[in-house]
Image (tube, rainbow, N blue to C red):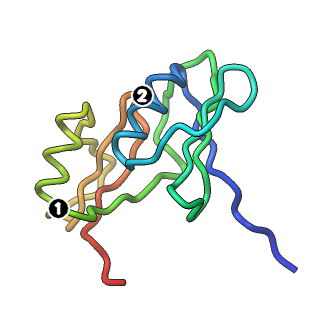
Amino acid sequence: MACMLNEIVIDSHDTTAQAAWWSQVLGWPITSPWGEGSLRLEAPGGAGPRILFEPVPDAKTVKNRLHLDVEPREATIEQELERLLALGARHADIGQGDVQWFVLADLEGNEFCLIPAQES
């Protein structure tokens, strides 16, 4: 017997802004609130885990121990990088060196990676 990954929880100072931003990044709708101040995103068709933005009073202060990797679906990695930066992402240096992907940070400084599209 094994567990199933249900959702990824991201602590957020401003859950509304974070959920709206990630909704634009992923193209996933905000499906429902979950508890007071929490917001949830779900992939269309329910494919994959949900993302829950949970309110916390404090701001992020250290590097993430867990991060999300996203990949472009209908654009080159360079085009998607431009789109994410226009949405408010910013480059992040976590000591990654010279790599083939981009380390970025969301509105609250949570690191994530934009990786080249993977072959299915």
Residue drawn at x 29%, y 64% is 115
Residue drawn at x 66%, y 52% is 7
Query: x, y percentage for residue 84?
Result: 23, 43
Residue topped by disc 2: 108
Q: Point out the frontmost of discs 1 and 2.
A: 1
Quarter of the figure with residue 76 = bottom left
Labels 1 & 2 near each other (Cβ < 8 A): no
Which amino acid lies under the numbered mark 2 shown in the image of this protein? Answer: Glu
Specify few, some or many for label 2: CA neighbours under 10 Å numbering under 14, 14-19, or 20 or more: some
Residue topped by disc 1: 75
> Left of 7 or right of it: where is 67?
left
In the depicted view, which residue is nearer to us: 100 or 17?
Answer: 17
Which residue reaches farthest right? 1
Quarter of the figure with residue 106 = top left
* Placement of the N terminus among the 4 image quadrants: bottom right
* Placement of the C terminus among the 4 image quadrants: bottom left
Tell me the tag on residue 119: none
Residue drawn at x 17%, y 35% is 86
Query: x, y percentage for residue 78?
Result: 11, 57
